[in-house]
Amino acid sequence: MTDSIYTRTEILLGEPTLNDLIDHHILIAGLGGVGSFVAESLGRLGIKRLSILDHDVVAPSNLNRQLVALHSTLGQPKVEVMAARLLDINPNIQLIKHGDFLHKEQAHEFIQTGNYDFVVDCIDSIASKAALVAACLRLNVPIASSMGAGNRLDVSKVKVAKLNQTEGCGLARELRALLRKEGVRTNYPVIYSQEIPRQPLPHQPVSGVEGRPRAVNGTISYMPALFGMMLSGVVVQALLKQIEEKQETA
């Protein structure tokens, strides 16, 4: 066994399973506090093909929680910063970069033509989020989503659940309502927190150049990272289950 990015994972999974696992094309939609950790963990796993989507640039307020945010990267497109970081980890990775905002009208075609084996939804815009999820569910593309990590502190309240099983998360509630209007199911995996969110301070500015304006939530360094790492685990376990089922029927 040669020492490489795959060595320790191969010890855990075995070479045949690892080879099957990394031979997937995964889309990470959103490269903020949650999505940047998803992208890095999947990159370190050795996934051969990653598509990354984000329209935003690195801002000073991102420094408290996002992997892409450094003083040296301020003002740079997040998709470019993340791509450079992933290639520094694994120069052989095949990267596809999408630096435009994903409007809800574009979601179906975007998923239909992307040839993704799995989609990881870390989008903030609720309209785009719902459209992306609906497109994946209609096209039978596996997807997992991050719900709201803002205004929360308690790591013990973070859970893996189906969207229709979540409690106490306003984003999950709003997403369920939109998906039901679209006539698609809501029993797909998400990461969410059962913690009652703290209220942001009054008179805060709103963010969102694209889509509707939204209140700026308070965030702490570790919570989005935890969501991202748990979301990566959900993706990997789902793919491993698919691989195991194929091996059993081969």
Image (cartoon, rainbow, N blue to C red):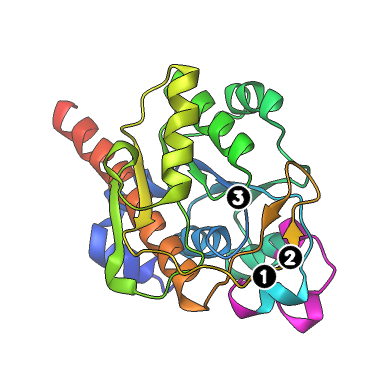
Q: Which residue is mark 3?
A: 124
- Residue shown at the point (50%, 19%) measured from the top left: 182
Find out whether residue 65 is within the magenta segment.
yes
- Residue shown at the point (63%, 36%) measured from the top left: 128
* Residue 102 lies in quadrant: top right
Find out whether residue 245 is within the magenta segment.
no
Q: Is residue 15 visible?
A: yes
Q: Which contiguous range is marked in magenta?
A: 64-81
* Among numbered discs 1 and 3, the one appearing first in the sequence: 1
* Among numbered discs 2 and 1, the one appearing first in the sequence: 1
Q: Position of residue 222 (x, y in %)?
A: 46, 77
Q: Indicate the amino acid at tag 2.
A: Val
Q: Which residue is mark 1?
A: 68
Label of residue 81 in the image: 2
* Among numbered discs 2 and 3, the one appearing first in the sequence: 2
- Residue shown at the point (78%, 83%) measured from the top left: 71
Q: Is residue 139 visible?
A: no
Q: Is 161 above or below relative to 84?
A: above
Q: Position of residue 124 (x, y in %)?
A: 60, 50
Q: Which is nearer the eye, 99 or 42?
A: 99
Q: Is 18 above or below relative to 104?
A: below
- Look at the image and tell me in which quarter the C terminus lies: top left
Q: Which is nearer the eye, 168 or 81?
A: 168
The answer to whether the residues at label 2 and label 1 have Cβ atoms under 8 Å apart is yes
* Label 1 to label 3: alpha-carbon separation: 17 Å
Q: Indicate the amino acid at tag 1.
A: Val
